[in-house]
């Protein structure tokens, strides 16, 4: 019989985990930044984990270290101390830089507050380029990119450049770019804060769906408390320390509209 | 279409400074080199545009002007031994003083003439044609009327660009080496920036006492029954000559004449200076432009880094971008140079642009662009994805 108790801490992280299996696990992360002559400790020995199929919300005021946390988790910013086990990798930070890049290319999606789309590329090309770097043949990349954009509701915008897309559409292109890779871990940093309520809602629903339908571990950093509604888990961080970690039942029909 | 090419086409304004820097560097070198080749061509135009398919010179000659080009007269009948040869004429020519005598008493001293505002005496190069119909020495674009006119004794033709310099018009008289000649023709398309050329018949040259009449003559101009066979016949003639002479096809000689210009030390210094200057300006501006353009897209590059695209791949994007900038720069340089060439031609200055020159300079510009790309790679280190997380 299969053990259906996934929430009781499995022993290790996995690439193709069932819902609830650990996707990423960090222990004792410490990160300091130089500030003048002294050092500011932004992460003070943070333990963190995130599971496949969960939308994990990391919340906290600005300067609390939440962005630094996901930078350390995703291999973008080397912590002074601590280890990160992600998917099939034991201690991500032991890998050489090239291997860390490759790990992100294979498994991680990123969504930022700014959309960071190349002004010269059409929506389709923005998504294709990453897939091509991943090693897909041009034909396959185009097919997958079209699917990803259709999925975020941009089938009619495939050949438009960022300049004529709305903010919400740009963020959806960025999400399609992240999701087309079929990432096992999806990092989102304030994905809705540059958007109005309506577009914010579309974006958070897409993140929700990435967790539900693809079993990605979605780690979303935000300071917008209204997003909690969609989360499986809310982790609050302040001054580099996790102060609360709650599981909750997401409400997929929640609304987020500034004018409501 | 690649990211680099799309970016260049879409944000072309951003890259215009680099493209223009490359274009102007290219123009500098192309125009200077082209002018010098053009000067060289001014001296050899009448030979290069003659109907001679092959030119026979001494074995050691490196170009028409360089080295021993004349041959013994007895080579003329020897060249006729090849059945493909239908005409052989030695090239002849000389130099001398040319003095317009229009409205001026030629017996006055130079100082007195100068006081009267008369055109001053010029040194000219004299080149000859044979006036027999269809002679090998006649440039192919000479009209029958011109040849007929030059058949008269003591007649010369000058190029339209020398009209002012020599101070004579069609029909005017002048002194060539102290002997009276009449200007009976004005040619078009034979400018010589350094020294005016007068064309006369071989007979006139003989009458002014400058023709080769001894055992040695100038290079032999050889006309073939079938000009298309020039390469083959030149090889045969070289075999027949057994080392006594070297037969050049007209094209080979034209190329050698152009190349010979660059054995002049001063030209190498001038053109070398242009190359160095063009390279420095090209690299500096292209480098800074590329840096600026990369910085403008640094967040986008950083987001690719976050998605796992490695530094090597980003470097390749930048190198590809600089390659395309170089290509556009080459096109712009060639278009600009062709424009300048047309302008210069209107002022009778020939800018000659052989394909090899365009290829070398074009390749150089692409190398400059790629070097600038290499220099700007450092700026990519600023694409820190962690900076995107706020």
Image (tube, helix red, strand yellow):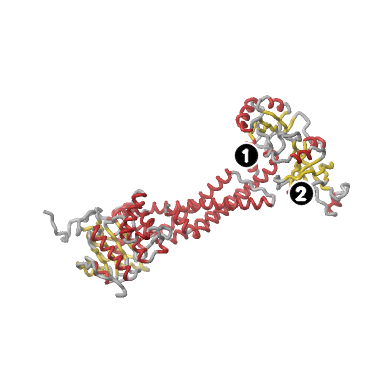
- The residue lying toward the viewer, choosing from A158 and B232, is A158
Q: Is residue B351 visible?
A: yes
Q: Residue at point 32% right, 69% down?
A: A198
Residue B203, by quadrant, is top right
Query: Where's residue B369, x and y in %?
Result: 50, 52
Which residue shows up at 24% across the image and 68% down it? A253
Residue A30 visible (yes or no): no
User: Left or right: where does residue B213 sit relative to residue B264?
Assistant: right
For discs 1 and 2, the disc positioned in front in the rendered view: 2
Name the residue located 28 percent from the left edge and 63 percent from the top edge. A207
Residue B255: mark = 1
What subunit carries mark 2?
B
Residue B163 disc label: 2
Apparent side of residue B290 relative to residue A60 in the rendered image (left or right):
right
Q: Which quadrant of the structure image shows residue A37? A: bottom left
Q: Are marks 1 and 2 in contact (CB under 8 Å)?
A: no
What is the chain letter for disc 1? B
Query: What is the crowding at mark 1: few (fewer than 14 residues within 10 Å), some, or many (at least 20)?
Result: few
Question: Residue B55, percent across and down?
Answer: 67, 33
Residue B357, numbered label: none
Q: Earlier in the sequence, mark 1 or mark 2?
A: 2
Secondary structure at numbered mark 2: helix
Check the picture and name the quadrant holding the C terminus of chain B.
bottom left
Q: CA distance from mark 1 to mark 2?
A: 29 Å
Viewer-nearest residue: B288 or A207: A207
Can you give x and y, in whole percent of width and height, for residue A134 in the image?
Answer: 34, 51
Seen at 73% across and 41% down, the residue is B143
Task: Tell me the SS state at disc 1.
Answer: helix
């Amino acid at each position: 019989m299969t053990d259906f108790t996934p929430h009781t801490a499995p022993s290790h992280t996995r690439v193709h985990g069932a819902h609830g299996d650990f996707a990423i696990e960090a222990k004792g992360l410490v990160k300091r930044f130089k500030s003048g002559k002294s050092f500011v400790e932004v992460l003070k020995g943070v333990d963190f984990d995130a599971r496949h199929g969960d939308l994990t919300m990391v919340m906290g005021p600005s300067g609390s270290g939440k962005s630094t946390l996901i930078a350390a988790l995703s291999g973008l910013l080397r912590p002074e101390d601590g280890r990160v086990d992600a998917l099939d990798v034991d201690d991500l930070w032991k890998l050489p830089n090239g291997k860390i890049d490759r790990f992100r290319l294979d498994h991680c999606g990123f969504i930022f507050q700014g959309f960071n789309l190349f002004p010269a590329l059409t929506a389709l090309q923005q998504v294709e380029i990453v897939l091509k770097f991943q090693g897909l043949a041009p034909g396959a990349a185009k097919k997958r990119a079209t699917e990803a954009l259709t999925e975020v509701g941009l089938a009619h915008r495939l050949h438009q450049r960022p300049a004529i897309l709305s903010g919400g559409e740009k963020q959806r292109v960025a999400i399609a770019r992240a999701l087309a890779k079929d990432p096992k871990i999806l990092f989102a940093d304030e994905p809705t804060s540059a958007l109005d309520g309506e577009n914010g809602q579309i974006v958070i629903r897409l993140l929700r769906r990435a967790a539900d339908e693809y079993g990605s571990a979605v780690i979303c950093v935000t300071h917008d408390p209204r997003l909690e509604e969609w989360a499986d888990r809310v982790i609050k961080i302040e001054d580099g320390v996790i102060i609360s970690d709650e599981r909750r039942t997401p409400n997929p029909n929640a609304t987020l509209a500034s004018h409501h | 279409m690649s990211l680099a090419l799309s970016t260049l086409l879409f944000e072309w304004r951003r890259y215009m400074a680099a493209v223009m820097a490359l274009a102007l560097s290219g123009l500098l070198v192309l125009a200077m080199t082209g002018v010098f080749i053009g000067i060289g061509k001014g001296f050899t135009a009448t030979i290069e545009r003659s109907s001679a398919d092959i030119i026979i010179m001494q074995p050691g000659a490196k170009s028409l002007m360089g080295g021993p080009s004349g041959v013994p007269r007895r080579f003329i009948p020897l060249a006729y031994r090849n059945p493909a040869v239908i005409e052989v004429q030695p090239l002849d020519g000389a130099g001398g003083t040319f003095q317009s005598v229009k409205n001026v008493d030629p017996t006055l001293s130079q100082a007195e003439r100068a006081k009267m505002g008369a055109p001053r005496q010029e040194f000219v190069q004299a080149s000859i044609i044979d006036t027999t119909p269809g002679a090998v020495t006649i440039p192919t674009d000479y009209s029958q009327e011109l040849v007929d006119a030059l058949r008269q004794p003591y007649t010369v033709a000058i190029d339209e660009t020398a009209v002012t310099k020599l101070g004579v018009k069609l029909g005017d008289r002048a002194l060539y080496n102290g002997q009276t000649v009449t200007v009976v023709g004005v040619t078009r398309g034979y400018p010589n920036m350094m020294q005016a050329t007068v064309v006369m018949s071989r007979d006139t040259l003989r009458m002014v006492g400058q023709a080769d009449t001894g055992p040695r003559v100038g290079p032999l101009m050889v006309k073939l029954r079938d000009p298309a066979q020039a390469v083959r016949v030149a090889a045969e003639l070289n075999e027949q000559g057994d080392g006594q002479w070297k037969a050049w096809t007209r094209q080979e000689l034209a190329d050698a004449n152009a190349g010979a210009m660059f054995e002049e030390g001063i030209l190498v210094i001038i053109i070398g200076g242009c190359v160095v200057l063009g390279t420095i300006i090209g690299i500096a501006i292209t480098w800074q432009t590329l840096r600026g353009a990369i910085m403008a897209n640094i967040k986008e590059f950083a987001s690719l880094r976050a998605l796992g695209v490695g530094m090597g791949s980003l470097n390749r994007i930048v190198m590809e971008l600089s390659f395309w900038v170089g290509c556009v720069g080459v096109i712009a340089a060639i278009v600009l140079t062709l424009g300048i060439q047309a302008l210069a031609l209107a002022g009778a200055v020939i800018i000659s642009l052989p394909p090899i020159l365009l290829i070398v300079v074009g390749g150089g510009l692409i190398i400059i662009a790629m070097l600038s790309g290499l220099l700007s790679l450092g700026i990519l280190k600023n694409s820190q994805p962690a900076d995107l997380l706020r």
